[in-house]
Image: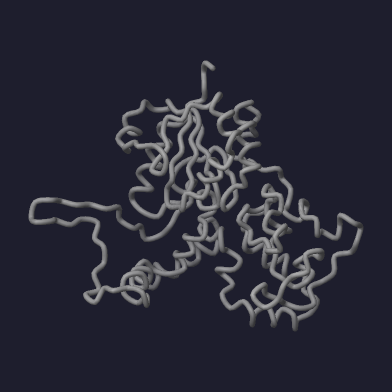
Amino acid sequence: MANKLKTAFLLAGGCAGCEMSVVDLSEKLVDALEHLEIVFWAPTVADVKYQDLEDMPDKSIDLAFVDGMIRNTENLHTVQVLRAKSKVLVAFGACATLGGIAALGDLHTKEELFRQAYKDSFSTDNPEGVYPEPEYLLDGKYNLTIPAILDTCSTIDQVVAVDYYVGGCPPHPSFVGKLVGAIVAGDLPPAGSWLTGGKAVCDTCKRNPALTGQERLPIGEIKRTIDDRPDPNICLLQQGYMCFGPVTQGDCGASCLNVNIPCRGCGGPIPGIKDFGARCVSTLASSMASEAVAEQFIEKYNDMAKMFYRYSHTASKLNHRVAEQKENAA
């Protein structure tokens, strides 16, 4: 087929799970390659160098996917280069769009993170307390370099312009298949949009009492899955398990709830929500039957920032506040 879309994939500060969702398309990926020409896929799949990307003409790539957030200088540089080379750039997955789990490190200073990783961890054997250095002169003649860790994490749109956003940790393969089909057909919304079906997880969940005309009952008790086994036929939130399905995009088809696990919000906020964690707090607080239930929640979940902003801390207003506190303490 002539005029294939020149396509690139770049892993920044992430785990490559989002790229596995692309590979998990299986035969559908083979079909998609009739319309897509992969010109760059690093550092996970293709044997290429970053120089190969830098040497490409500007805007020569039709479509670029970036998964992972910005954690170090290499992430920052390669994403900036890819943006210059690409006509359309998609922030792909929870880390790229919202910060992801690893970005919860921003609730701590870089020194605290390094100390835990290289000194205080029970499995660390580092009696001299050596930290990795961005530059090291080996044998007096070999200048070795590694990327430097940045003071804070960033989402992709905090460092370059992003055309489209896709949530999920990782994006569900079934939705990735629909996404690729829409891209090939040119059936895309205006730039700046989230590529989503627009429904909440609750709208796709078979437990939703509204689907059978039942009333949604208030939360009368707080439970954790570590303590009990949820009833597979009753709304998890009604049972007292913290489920963020009401405010999370449901492009996953409620896959976690289908195996009796509450939604934790990796799909990102449904349209119209600016701060995911703040809306979670509001939704859950208004669903609790009494002040006693709220107190029980506080007792059972003592790290609420990491609970409500598990995937979205970097993109939230809370992150700005934490940054201000760090700056004032410095």
State the image coordinates of residue 48 (x, y, percent, origin top left).
Answer: 34, 36
Instruction: Look at the image and tell me in which quarter the N terminus lies.
Output: top right
Please tell me which residue lies in front, 108 or 244: 244
State the image coordinates of residue 305 (x, y, percent, origin top left).
Answer: 56, 69
Outermost residue toward the top in this view:
2
Q: Is residue 323 visible?
A: no
State the image coordinates of residue 192 (x, y, percent, origin top left).
Answer: 58, 39
Name the residue: 13% across, 56% down: 138
Q: Tell me where residue 223 sits by quadrant.
A: bottom right
State the image coordinates of residue 315 (x, y, percent, origin top left).
Answer: 53, 55
Name the residue: 85% across, 69% down: 217
How many numbered marks appear?
0
Q: Tell me where residue 58 sits by quadrant.
A: top left
Q: Is residue 238 visible?
A: yes
Q: Is residue 49 above or below residue 254?
A: above
User: In the rendered view, does 295 fall on the left or right side of 218?
Assistant: left
Please tell me which residue lies in front, 131 or 259: 259
Outermost residue toward the right in this view:
213
Q: Is residue 302 above or below residue 20?
A: below
Name the residue: 71% across, 54% down: 254
User: In the rendered view, does 215 fall on the left or right side of 326?
Assistant: right
Instruction: Look at the image and tell me in which quarter the C terminus lies.
Output: bottom left
